[in-house]
Image (cartoon, coloured by chain):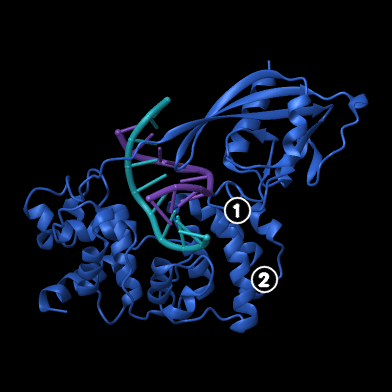
Chain colours: A blue, B cyan, C purple
DNA sequence: GTCCAGGAAC
DNA sequence: GTTCCTGGAC
């Protein structure tokens, strides 16, 4: 690390001491961070914003304060808490990892990158982040915020996705040997609060004089935008099958989209073959509404059908289908797509 | 309404 | 390279 690079990390650390965000997984003062909390937070923060994570994190820690308690939970409980947060394989991997940490590591999160990488759900970013933040061991952490900050600092004129190696090298150069956890979080907080994607607040930036993009008056154009790949759209059908105050719901397959989550019977949109849903074709149905929902790789238009179920139809329910009390749907694990559909139906039924 | 940001697994 | 979700900015 050259003298100039040390000056950058010193400025960032000084700024962090005054401006660190107060986040529930952070401890201040002399207390050492709790590796368990850092792990849970980093998994939740994958592809998910801080604001969305905070309430989920608080509930999670309240319910399972330690690895030991988490590994005794059922996956269904973890999915229920995760409901609405998205990317549900994270919950599955977290639950799986807790058992491994319990049996193989005596409930202590491993503290080397190579051991962390063996845990399901932990990739190169998360392993480095845990090393730095939980254990204050030197690691090069490159998350979404840091990619942007570093691209601007060093005026890297390439789209982020095509430039991982160069960004990693520059991040490595400015990463100090001491206070690594604070340094990493200073970059994250700077990216979140000051060096924002649009309208960066350069006047608040502690390293404005070191920023080559700013010096070139290009801070609003770095990192370069890459052309967006076009999203296709899909059409599906969801069925609100009602029997008095009950509605028919089921648990989705344990793989693929929205795996193991609860749902209204829905067909024609997820490229899955689920023979349990074949009975739907025979039902007499009426289209009552539709909604739109965005996934990463497609836009979904979901038509909503109402089926008034007659007792004498005597439907034999497939596995993992149940009649749920319409007034007590909270206990199920619905993804946001289903919450949106249910809300729409319930609102439409009000006069 | 549409776009965009945010990592891991396969 | 493709599949996994959501909330907030625009």
Left or right side of A116 for C9 = left
**Coordinates of residue A346 in the picture (x, y in percent):** 68, 26
Q: Is residue A190 visible?
A: no
Disc number for residue A71: 2
Disc number for residue A73: none
Left or right side of A274 for A325 = right
Alpha-carbon neighbours of circle 2 within 10 Å: few (<14), some, or many (≥20)? many
Left or right side of A40 for A203 = left
- Residue at the image point whose x is 25% and y is 74% from the top: A175
| Quarter of the figure with residue A237 | top right
Letter of the chain that mark 2 sits on in the rendering: A
- Residue at the image point whose x is 13% and y is 57% from the top: A155
Depicted B7 relative to depicted A172: above or below: above
**Coordinates of residue A82 in the picture (x, y in percent):** 60, 53
Which secondary structure, mark 2?
Answer: loop
The front one of A176 and A114 is A114
The N terminus of chain A: image quadrant: bottom left
Which secondary structure, mark 1?
Answer: helix
Alpha-carbon neighbours of circle 1 within 10 Å: few (<14), some, or many (≥20)? many
The front one of A83 and A61 is A83
Letter of the chain that mark 1 sits on in the rendering: A
């Amino acid at each position: 690390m050259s003298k100039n690079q040390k000056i950058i990390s010193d400025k960032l650390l000084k700024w962090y001491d005054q401006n660190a965000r107060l986040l529930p997984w952070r401890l201040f003062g002399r207390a050492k961070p709790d590796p368990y909390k850092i792990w849970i937070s980093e998994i939740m923060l994958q592809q998910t914003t801080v604001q969305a994570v905070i309430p989920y994190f608080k509930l999670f820690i309240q319910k399972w304060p330690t690895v030991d308690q988490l590994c005794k939970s059922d996956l269904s409980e973890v999915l229920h808490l995760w409901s609405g947060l998205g990317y549900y394989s994270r919950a599955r991997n977290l639950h799986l990892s807790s058992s491994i940490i319990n049996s193989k590591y005596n409930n202590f999160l491993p503290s080397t990158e190579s051991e962390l990488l063996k845990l399901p759900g932990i990739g190169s970013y998360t392993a480095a982040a845990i090393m730095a933040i939980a254990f204050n061991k030197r690691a090069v952490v490159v998350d979404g915020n840091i990619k942007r900050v570093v691209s601007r600092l060093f005026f890297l004129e390439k789209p982020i996705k095509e430039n991982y190696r160069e960004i990693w090298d520059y991040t490595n150069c400015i990463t100090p040997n001491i206070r690594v956890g604070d340094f990493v979080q200073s970059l994250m907080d700077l990216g979140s609060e000051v060096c924002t994607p649009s309208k960066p607040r350069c006047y608040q930036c502690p390293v404005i004089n070191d920023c080559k993009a700013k010096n070139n008056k290009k801070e609003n154009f770095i990192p370069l935008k890459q052309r967006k790949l076009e999203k296709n759209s899909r059409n599906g059908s969801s069925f609100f099958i009602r029997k008095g105050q009950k509605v028919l719901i089921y648990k989705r397959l344990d793989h693929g989209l929205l795996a193991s989550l609860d749902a209204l019977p829905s067909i024609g949109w997820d490229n899955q073959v689920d023979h349990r849903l074949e009975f739907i074709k025979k039902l007499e149905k009426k289209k009552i509404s539709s909604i739109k929902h965005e996934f990463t790789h497609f836009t979904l238009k979901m038509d909503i059908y109402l089926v008034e179920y007659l007792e004498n139809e005597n439907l034999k329910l497939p596995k993992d289908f149940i009649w749920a009390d319409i007034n007590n749907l909270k206990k199920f694990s619905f993804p946001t797509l289903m919450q949106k559909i249910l809300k729409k139906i319930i609102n439409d039924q009000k006069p």
